[in-house]
Amino acid sequence: MGKDNVLEIYDEAYAQEYNQKFLLNMRSKIDTDFEEETINKLLSEIGNGATWLDVACGTGYFLSCFPNVERAGLDISPAMLKVAKQANPDALFVQGDYRDQRPQWEGKWDLVTCMWWAYGYVESLSQLEIVVENLTDWTSERGVCFLPICVPEDIGAGNIKLPYSQDVAVYGGTIRFEGIIWSWTENVEKLHLNLLAPQLEYMVALFKKYFEQVEIIDYPLVEGACRKAIVARSKKQKEVSQTKAKIEILTTNAFFSPFFKAIRSHDWWLYKIPPLLTIAYAEILLLNLPVLQSLLTVAALLFAIACVAAYGHIINDSFDVEVDRQVGKRNAMAQFSLWQRALFCLALAGLGFSLPVLMKFSTLAISLLGINYLLPTLYSAPPFRFKEKGILGILSDAAGAHAIPTLFIATTFAHLVAAPPLQGIGLAIAATAWSSFAGIRGILLHQLWDRDDDLRSQVKTLVTESNVENVRFWMSRIIFPIEMLLLGSLILVISYSTPLILVFTVFYFLSKLALTKSDPTSTFDPAPVEKSYVVPHDFYEVGLPLILVTALSLQNPWFAILLLLQVTLFYPGIERRVTNLAQSLRGKPQDLNPLQTQLTASQAEVAQLQTTLQQTQNQLEQVQSELQTQLNTSHAEVAQLYVHIQQAQNQLGQVREQLQHLQTEAQRDRTQTQAELANLQAEIAQAEAARQTSQVEAMRLKAFLQTQGSDGLLNYYRHAIATNPDDIQLYYQALEIQPDDVQFHLQLGNALVRQGQITEAIARYQIALQLHPDQFELHFELAKALEKNQQWDDALASYRRAIGLNPNHSLAHQHLGDALAECGRIHEASLSYRHALQLQYKFSESLRR
């Protein structure tokens, strides 16, 4: 079944009614529930942290049943994916063909499913084998693959009976009936053409190529039919992929494989080195350098840059070992000790400088090489660790991986001639600028694709700390257009010596435009959220270096050595890009032949776009005029507001000055009041001492006047208490004889206060007040005890009751003032102090009279 047929069937109307028609009706609901139950069991079997990919996910119904699982869906139909995204807003969905390889998903998913016979929507058994191989590749080592299967018996309701293999009676040998091709015309005029239904034995054999355990499970019996499904476990160890094998053949042997895994050459060799060689080839063409000198310089540059790239990955992983360990992320440097990591870094640094120094590169070139080693160090190592410093990390990576190496190459070649031509300087500037923006977009893509891992590792990057859509907007609408403009300027500079590059560039982009228009499923996105193909990358990595080194070979046959090395060293990348191009051409060849038709259509669209742009420009001018008017009005309002603000500031200044003046006066009054209060307290203390002395003398005098009996005993206690006023037991003994004696209660409370038993003293005063509520001294001493205990409200109330009983007691007014001052009620305190002073003054006047 072709891609166009699939897209025609699964349109928006079909997608809206799909679930109810095929999954939730009375007949299908039994099978759907069984599949949901099976998926739940498989996820539980895998355990915590299971990840799930549903291939040909359709409307995402099954994915929506498990919202707490990290899950993703792949489907070719935009209409079906639209419904799936609505049902699973937190899941990842990718539009694409399940026959296409996706290296970024290799070994990523713990559960891989392909539901409802979707694997049969292919055009041949060989394509089906590609689909199953992809399902296997995307399954993790601990993963499970679940595939409901369609066998011929299911289609014919049991009437189709085919043996899988049978002997040929006449001619000998055996034949295999591997499956059937069938079509289905729906009542709604949807035509499913040429679907595959392989035999059960064929499907089992196919899965056994990739899995140790392949189990057939039966669905519940429904209307006499019993569907089947394959559950494949224990993924077999796959042979090393062709790409990695070819790289290893060229770069390493079994002894050094841990080292080459540690430098992660597969992450940069095929992607970052070819664009740099493009600049080297362009310099050779522009400067017309000799063959031998060119070969030696290219070899030295290639070796030095490879050492820098390896150094950058090793030092980055070395400082990420602990972070990756905490979140369970694999780190190639974890297997090495600290001194081994340091030795790797030192060795790569020494090797990187060796050839440039021996070949006497310019001082500027060697300095740039040193900067190229410094940047990844600052990017990875604390305390700098630019990778976690937002935009600083972006700029340092773009400079270290792209801009500085490009300038290093251009500077090295410029040193080989006595006077570099003006075009050579232009080439260096254009190449460095272009590589800078390509590098910025490259590191942003890397951080975008690694965002989930960085979040789990708690690694702060610009992308993890920013809104993803804002980052993608900058990449798509600002960085990428500037990158393309700078690429155009670079191509123009190179075309001065190699006009062929201009023709090739135009042909490339026109071809990409034609392919995009011929395939309705293809989308152009320079900032995809998942690892995927981005349009100019094959041009950077394969097209540009190949066309330039081919031009060199045509100029001088000895440069064919460079062409041979380019193809040999980077063959995996060339093969993959050519394969992808072939798959794109094979997807819809009938639309790629008439290129002129596409160009004509493009010209018409350009003309229409120009008209639209003109209309937009007119609208923008009108909007600009309106905005200017609004801006002038706003300026007037702002000026008026500024005047009001100035007036408010002046008034505020005046209020502030008045407040400062009041504060100064209050401080002066408070100082004066405190001085007066201190004097008054001293006078009151002297008066109190005199009063207490008089009381002692009076009590002694009474002792001589006592008679015998209880009165005499009480007099004894009074004399004893006067002699030893802190003996608490004397008070209690006296109170046993005369419980209602107010003086005993009062003196007991005072003794308790002196001994620091404030709470007991308060209780004693309160008992005495129940017996003698009108006793001034009880209220006064209770108030002082409450004040000591910081029971301010009760203390103030007691002081006021005492003053009510004896308004002329200056000390009571003074203590009330102290309590009010402690409560912050300064004005009331001042009044009490003044009243106390007045009473003291009157008392002094009476004494003088």
Image: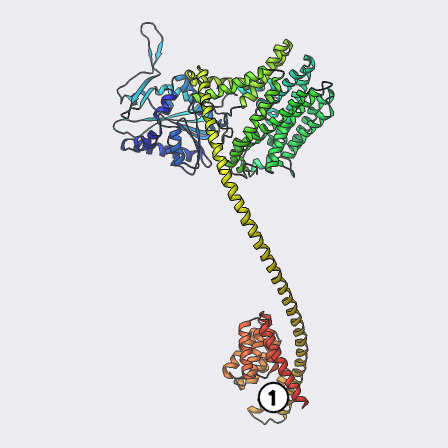
The residue at the point 65 percent across, 74 percent down is 673
Looking at the picture, tell me which residue is in the foreground, 8 or 817: 8
Location of residue 604 (image quadrant) = top left
- In the rendered image, the quadrant that contains the C terminus is bottom right
Looking at the picture, tell me which residue is in the foreground, 74 or 672: 672
Residue 367, given in percent of the width and then of the height, sits at 71, 28
149 above or below 289? below
The residue at the point 47 percent across, 17 percent down is 582
826 above or below 296? below
Q: What SS does tag 1 mark?
A: helix
Looking at the picture, tell me which residue is in the foreground, 713 or 647: 647
Residue 804, given in percent of the width and then of the height, sits at 54, 82
295 above or below 661? above
Question: Callout 1: few (<14), some (14-19), or many (20+) C-alpha neighbours within 10 Å?
Answer: some
Q: Can residue 566 be seen in this view?
A: no
Question: Viewed as shown, does residue 489 lie left or right of 144?
Answer: right
Looking at the picture, tell me which residue is in the foreground, 401 or 608: 608
Residue 466, given in percent of the width and then of the height, sits at 53, 39
Q: Can residue 389 be seen in this view?
A: yes
Location of residue 252 (image quadrant) = top right
The residue to which callout 1 is attached is 716
Which amino acid, mark 1? Tyr
The figure's colour scheme reads rainbow
- In the rendered image, the quadrant that contains the N terminus is top left
